[in-house]
Image (cartoon, rainbow, N blue to C red):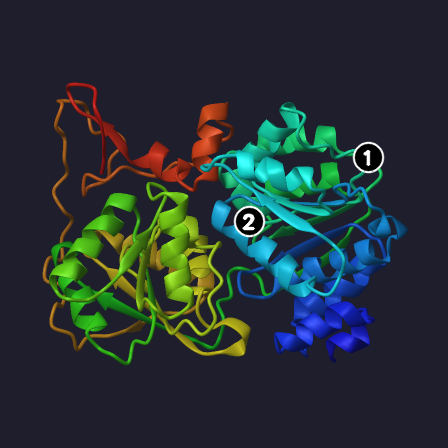
Amino acid sequence: MQFKELNVIPSILKALEKENYTVPTPIQEKAIPCILSGRDLIGCAQTGTGKTAAFAIPTLQLLSEDKASGTVERKIRALIVTPTRELALQIYESFCTYGKYTKLRSCVIFGGVSQKPQEEHLQQGVDILVATPGRLNDLINQKKIDLKFLKIFILDEADRMLDMGFINDIKKIIAKIPVNKQTLLFSATMPADVAKLSNDMLRNPAKIEITPVSSTVDAIEQYVYYVDKNNKKNLLVHLLKDKTIVSALVFTRTKHGADRIIRQLSRNNVPAQAIHGDKSQGARQSALNNFKNKKLRILVATDIAARGIDIDELSHVINYDLPDVPETYVHRIGRTGRAGLGGIAISFCDFDEKEQLADIEKLIKKRLNEVKDHPYPLVNNFPAPKTTQPRGGKKASSHTSTGQAVSKQTGTFPDKKHRMAENGTLKEKRSSLKFSKKGKKRDR
């Protein structure tokens, strides 16, 4: 099947053809006709399956066919809410790309930057608004945004949204939009809280499930290197000196860990940049653009990037630290092997991470291929000593045997911390802060 067989209008088909899009992915093939029919929809699909186009294409078409699109005064008729700045920008860029030959105007708003330019853009009139929850509610409260003309509401990455504590923000947004509208909810997983949210939001929705999160893309080759924690940096340098690794996205658990990796790579003449919550929006976007444009070969990231980076032909994903949540592994390695292309996922595993590895293999129902022939094999086959008295004399009850803070998911957070979550840093902030005797915060 091709896009033209889905009754996509000529102006959008022209934009798709320019991007060499001819054959829709499974979720696009199923979702586009359903959305064009006006039905509410729940779409469950893992990262890399093309779900942005699955909702962007029919949204653009429905608004283009709406007679109101020809009026001089533009009103927000489609709202897409997503958890992070990077993802908001990428969705906005997709709407601009697919809608370049329509008369529709899109806008993106997010926190962490001045709202003035965003206000000015909104004042010019907008048909489609892409937003993160905190900034959206701020501008609604300031009466800078009016959603009473809304016809399509899209909640993207719903599971990630709830993980980051945005449930109260979402409820506030829902209270401000019309009851009679088309609602689309997309999520990589469907835990109980997302299912409850969908029951509250949607009316008799169609349900589409494509490739459950537990099944990683078959095209991705998955390897594990057993290595002592203190030799991970040396193993990473050793691997990255191999020029056959055309591009690599390296995941670490914390932002300070990412910065340490950058310093280690720099000392060994391996150019790389980091992207995490402590970086300014400009620095994050610059690093991401350099990586996408192949000016940069190595990008080091925390999990804020796990679902927010869409990069064509990424050859390698390297898990420097294994994630605490096994589903996160699937999201991480889903950055490669996209659109049917191959890819390689490499994971480092020290003794204390063997339990996480077992959980990952249980989830994906397969064993990772062990690479034994490398210069830094695992030697310390015993747990790292527990840190019972960290600096400051406080009890280390919330720490693992390596002295690292354990990440805990919680429900809702105060408004100030919502903005931290919007910057992609909330989970790190809550899980990794320690306090010294003087009361100063330091990252693990």
In the structure shown, which secondary structural element does the residue marked by tag 1 occupy?
loop
Seen at 19% across and 66% down, the residue is 270
Whole-percent x, y for residue 205 in the image: 78, 50
Q: Can I make out residue 228 in this image?
A: no
Disc number lying in front (1 or 2): 2
Nearer the observer, 195 or 440 = 440
> The residue under label 2 is which amino acid type?
Ala
Question: Is disc 1 in contact with disc 2, using a CB cutoff of under 8 Å?
Answer: no
Whole-percent x, y for residue 280 in the image: 36, 43
Seen at 34% across and 44% down, the residue is 279
Seen at 55% across and 60% down, the residue is 46
- The quadrant in which the C terminus is found is top left
| Image side of residue 440 versus residue 424, left or right | left
**Res 88 label:** 2
| Mark toward the start of the polypeptide (1 vs 2) | 2
> The residue under label 1 is which amino acid type?
Val
Label 1 sits on residue = 179
Vertical placement of 256 versus 398: above or below? below
- The quadrant in which the N terminus is found is bottom right
The quadrant holding residue 314 is bottom left
The quadrant holding residue 176 is top right
In the structure shown, which secondary structural element does the residue marked by tag 2 occupy?
helix
Label 1 and label 2: CA atoms lie apart by 24 Å
